[in-house]
Structures are given as structure tokens and as C-alpha cells.
Amino acid sequence: MFDSYRDKYENVRMKREDGILEVALHTRGGPLVFNGYVHEALVRAFRDIGDDRDNHVVILTGTGDEFCAQLSPEGFDFFTPTGYDKILREGTKVLENILDIQVPMIAAINGAATAHSEYALLCDIVIAAEGAYFQDAPHPAFGIVPGDGLHIVWPEVIGEIRGRYFLLSGQKLSAAQAKEYGAVNEVVSRDALLPRAWELARHLKKQSPLTLRYTRMALSTRFRRRLQEGLSYGLALEGISAAQVAALNAQKA
């Protein structure tokens, strides 16, 4: 089954050894530029990964010195009902599909994670390179609500007061600060990042596939419930705020 999807996605580089799957997000071999086409593709990519019973541990990382930091409006339509309906459906399914990867996931944060850091925080283990950092940059820049899962995941991981401050203030958390807050388990040198992720994966792999699968299921129950309660609502609020931005821009034009 792996051969049917390993090279299927332009922005997802995959390799697998002994049931450990490394998933690296990229654009033409360099840091990922996240656009509407990536958004759509990741829904299917995470579904394929989750459906493959031969994946026993998954490592999620970025490329170069960024985990996910560059955005492009290409392929997104925030400003029509039909266009935003597509964004809402994909934004819901991509996080559901990450949680439906029913094996332990390790996030290896190789650099800036200023967009879609919720993908990393839905993993079971998060390790970060020295110099990596977390921030919600796009939503304040565009003037829209951070309702794509950040509003649930960050307060859940670092606490309600810290999480709200992080999202409202545009706070930039270094890898060390994120570790202090509880969003990161380990901080290592950049050269040691992927070797350490693989070391952890091999350690996990000592358990039986069924134990790994059921442990992930048990540990992800709370996130599943929180996302079911608030993700679609947050995305709808984000869409309304995007419509307001469009209306204000039209008035200025």
C-alpha cells in the first residue's frame, strides 16, 4: 500500500523503514509554502497514512529551517460562501485525519512554526531544534480569527490563560520557552533532531503494533472531543471575520 501513495503528493516527502514513516513537508525540496493546494492535499495524505496498517510510528517534520512558516493565497478562496465552505470542510477533515492516524506520532520541529502549528501539537511527542520557535503569525496579519484549531489546541496544551495570551498577543515562543510551557518535550541541536526522532520511534516500535495503535487512540480521546466541540465553530467565526476584512478592503478600494 505504501507504494500507492509514497510519491503521490507534491509537497509531502515520505520514507519508511521497519514500519517507521518519516513525513517531511516541503515545496520543491525547500521549506514548505502553504497554500490552498497544500491544504487540500494534506487532507488526503494524512488519510492515506492513517489507512496504512503497516505504519507503526509516524515522524512529522519540515524542510530546511522552517517547519511551516510561509503562506500563499494561491488556491484559497476566503471570500465567497462556496470557497470558504471548501476551506471549512478541509480544515475540519485535516485535523480529524491526523487524529485518525492511530499510531504514535512524533513531531520534529526543525525551525519556525508560525503557521499550522496545531499539526505538530496533535502529535504525541514534540521535539524541537534549538532556534525553532512557535507563533501564530498569519491570523493577526490578515485580521482574522485563529479558528482553524489553534484556538483549541494551544490553550489545551499550555493552559487557558497562556494559550489565550499566545493567540491574542502574537507571542513568539522559543523552543526553550515552549518546553517550559509544556508544548515541547525535548530541545536538541538541529543536527540531532531527526536522529533523536528516529531513536524515539525505534524505542516505541519495541511495543506490538496493536499496543501502539490502541495507546494512540487512548491518548487522543480528549483532543477528539475538544475538536468536535469547537473546530467547526471556530472555522465559521474565522470565515465571518475574513468576510469583514474583504468588505473593509472593498470600501477602501
Image (spheres, rainbow, N blue to C red):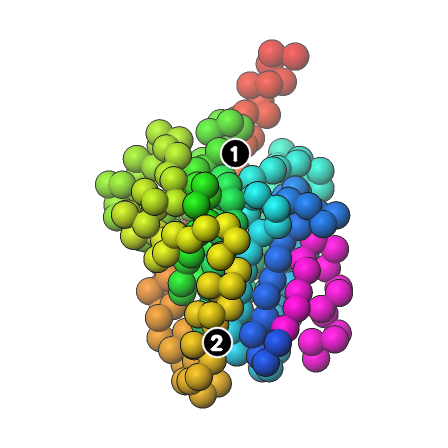
- What residue did someone put label 1 on? 138
> Is 131 placed above or below 19 here?
above
Of pointers 1 and 2, the one earlier in the residue sequence: 1
> In the rendered image, is residue 34 in sight?
yes
Residue type pointed to by label 1:
Pro
Q: Quadrant of the N terminus?
A: bottom right
Q: Residue at x 41, y 58 (%)?
A: 126
> Is 204 placed above or below 77 here?
below
Q: What's the CA distance linking mark 1 and mark 2?
A: 35 Å
User: How far across and how far down the image is residue 117, in percent?
Assistant: 47, 48
Q: Is residue 111 magenta?
A: no
Q: Which mark is residue 202?
A: 2
Q: Is residue 32 left or right of residue 179?
A: right
Is residue 31 or residue 252 the one in the foreground?
A: 31
Q: Residue at x 43, y 80 (%)?
A: 212
Q: Which mark is residue 61?
A: none
Boundaries of the magenta span: 1-16
Give the total of numbered labels: 2
> In the rendered image, is residue 98 in sight?
no
User: How far across and how far down the image is residue 37, in percent?
Assistant: 70, 48
Q: Is residue 181 left or right of residue 93?
A: left
Tag 2's secondary structure?
A: helix
Q: Residue at x 44, y 70 (%)?
A: 200
Q: Is residue 115 left or right of residue 41?
A: left
Q: Quadrant of the C terminus?
A: top right
Q: Residue at x 43, y 38 (%)?
A: 135
Q: Residues within 10 Å of mark 2 (few under 14, many from 20)?
A: some
Is residue 236 or residue 204 the one in the foreground?
A: 204
